[in-house]
Image (tube, grey):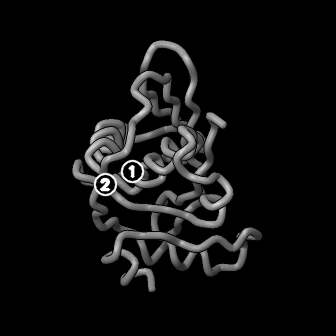
Amino acid sequence: MSLARVHTRALTGLSAKPVTVEVDLANGLPTFTLVGLADTEVKEARERVRAAIVNSGMAFPNNKRITVSLAPADLPKDSGRFDLPIALGVLAAAGFIDHAQLARYEFAGELSLSGELRAIRGALAMGLAMQSGTDPDQRMLVLPPTSAEEAA
């Protein structure tokens, strides 16, 4: 399957709203497009994700047209928190990660060029939003270690 969905959250003030990262790999001229009201920091994820995947020893789908949609489109998205969900979506769409496993989790984390996870702001808000009981899927939250301590 060349379409993958990964769940995450965007910060809006003190709340963390659900966001779905959809990644589509298609034939055509190789591009990496990000859509969905992404701030400059999020658009820079293209380069961090590409380098992180390659420097982690995995194959990046260089010969594909990659489209990443951050939905809902009208919700502003900022910071590097979307790096990890985007990278996982690319890997899942390329067939390296099982889609069913990804559906059980929400991810957030900034990636270094080497593939290491960096802390994000707002981990506590994400944890609180997930415990509010309004999510029928009851996913588990995956964060960088320092951010996970904050959320716990």
As drawn, the residue found furthest toward the top would be 29
According to the image, label 1 marks what residue? 83
Looking at the figure, which quarter contains the C terminus?
A: bottom left
Q: Nearer the viewer, residue 100 or 128?
A: 100
Residue at 44% across, 31% down: 61
Residue at 64% across, 52% down: 99
Alpha carbon separation for disc pair 2 and 1? 6 Å
- Which mark, by number, is residue 31? none
* Mark positioned earlier in the residue sequence (2 or 1): 1
- Which mark, by number, is residue 111? 2
Neighbor class of circle 1 (other Cα within 10 Å; few <14, some 14-19, many 20+) is many
Residue at 31% across, 54% down: 111
Q: Position of residue 1 (x, y in %)?
A: 66, 37
Q: Amino acid under label 1?
A: Asp
Q: Nearer the viewer, residue 60 or 77?
A: 60
Q: Position of residue 138 (x, y in %)?
A: 69, 73
